[in-house]
Amino acid sequence: MICNADSIPNGSCLRADVCIIGAGPAGIALALDLSERGFSVLLLESGFMEENPTTQRLYEGDVADKKLHSPPDKYRQRRFGGSTAIWGGRCMPFDPLDFEARSYVQHSGWPISYDDLLPYYPRANDLAEAGRFSYRAEDALGADTLPLIRGFESERVLTNGLERFSCPTHFGNRYARQLQLTPYVNVLLGANCTGIRLQPNKMAVRTVDVQTLTGTRFSATCRITVLAVGGLETARLLLASNDVAPEGIGNSHDVVGRYYMCHIAGNVGRLTIKGPTENVKHGYELSPEGIYCRRRLAVAPAEQQRLGLSNAVARLHFPRITDPVHRSGVLSGLFLARRLISYEYGKRLNDGNSSTTSADYARHVLNVATDPVDTTAFLMHWLSHRSLADRKYPSVILRNRTNRFSLEMHGEQIPQCNSRVKLSDKIDTLGMPKLHIDWRYSNSDIESIRGTLNVLSQEFAASGVARFEYDDENLEEDLTRFGAYGGHHIGTARMGNNERFSVVNAECQVHTVNNLFISGSAVFPTSSQANPTLTIIALSLRLGHTLAKKLGTPQQASVIDREFA
């Protein structure tokens, strides 16, 4: 059942086996898993089926440095399906190395291993509609597939890693019907969690407070409570729920909100590849089951360990879009239309600056006017393969005319305790304190990417088939031009065995609260090179298995049907 929370009588107390707060990919994946096991689930979602401006404003908050971090109401969607309403669909798992304690990555090491999560990745791939769990080119595309760069061979640099792309699947639209029909799940829209109330001994959740924007108030008392509200909102709820634990839930050692990570990313340098353009597979390829895939470059794990490098990948990318000297009508057209594009991509199309001159604008217009063939072909392809397609072409890929590329870097950020989110002295319309975000990167993050680029440069030169050069002096600027990249909010309630340095244990249970769990990237101890969504879903499915064992057998009836039918 899916209904508006305003239909619940004021002052009611709802019951279920599990209360899940947040209906993004983590919450929906967990609700589906538990319902298939016969457990009753109350799924509380602040938003509605469509974006609601008043609800979206509940995400508003402050940032310490607007150049480094976007306002917290951007990138995220407070609606049914969460930010999968706007994501690009990029899927890839974390690497085995990401879970290990690495001496050169401070605060690294997960209390679980890659093998612990591996059984849940295939189902995560299915839910994301990203095809088979196969992330090597020779496995996913066939043994006879051509290499990324013909003639380039290296033991230090891997070129057979893949990214797979979801439709992109909007989890709200895709799974609404299934959640509507199952008798075990009740979804309440417009249901804002305003507090998690503990028992006096602080060891268990007593009740969850819920409020709508129209003033309806009720509560939920369930056997298990799960926060699945994203890396920022998780910290906000834990810190604001301070009636029994004054420092906030799970925060007796001041860890909640700390170690906040995103990714270090930017377009860097110039890669010039010798030979015909057919020697380079820089665009998207279709797997046999019809999934868009794309290759990327990565320093081999053993070499990362030898050189002390954080995990990072590089994708072949077009030149800087703001500079009209590229003479591409497609790029200039995208630049001129950037304000009509979503916030995240529009910001990138602006290249992090607003210093474009009138002469630059004129040259962009000239590029469009003098490049009609490619521009028209691009628009037709975009219309047929993106706008009108169910499985959308993932992003802009230009025809390779010159074998010249920049490298789009996407790197792990080393966790540091001073990078954090905390409560501000401002409140929202529900009376909840807003967030103040102080995201920080370190010199080690930049130096690690520099080390990765140097390996790539050395291996390209040794191969004789390519040359890579980058502006070493301005590397930090290139990597921080977009600030905290991609809306990947990671690490604010990190997982670990020692509660002095973590918030949840290996089972995602808050250390000091035996029936409170967290699902999502907030619990990741490190950020990997990968976008977090696929691992969020896999970890949620693992949590479903954990909760099923903890609960034993279903006990609560279907909540709303029983009490308010």
Image (cartoon, grey):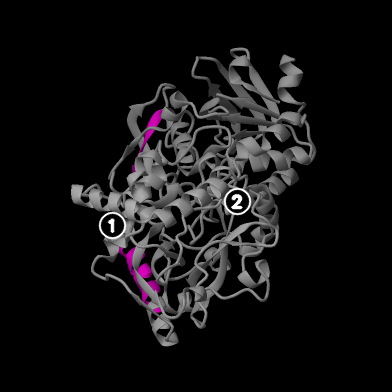
Mark 1 or 2 closer to N-term?
A: 2
Q: CA distance from mark 1 to mark 2?
A: 32 Å
> Relative to 203, is 9 above or below?
above
Q: Is residue 419 visible?
A: no
Q: Nearer the viewer, mark 1 or mark 2?
A: 1
Q: Is residue 71 magenta?
A: no
User: Label 2 belongs to which residue?
Assistant: 166
Would you say 311 lies left or right of 209 here?
left
**Mark 1 touching mark 2, by CB under 8 A?**
no
Q: Magenta segment, which residues?
A: 433-455
As drawn, the label of residue 324 is 1
Instruction: Indicate the quadrant where residue 138 lies.
Output: bottom right
> Relative to 181, is 230 above or below?
below
| Amino acid on which the number 2 mark rests in the picture | Ser
Q: Secondary structure at mark 1?
A: helix
Residue 319 lies, in percent from the top left, at 35, 62
| 340 and 198: which is toward the camera | 340
Residue 72 lies, in percent from the top left, at 39, 38
| 41 and 65: which is toward the camera | 65
The residue shown at (76%, 32%) is 182
**Residue neighbourhood size for the residue with mark 1, other residues' Cα within 10 Å, grouped as few (<14), some (14–19), many (≥20):** many
Q: Is residue 251 visible?
A: yes
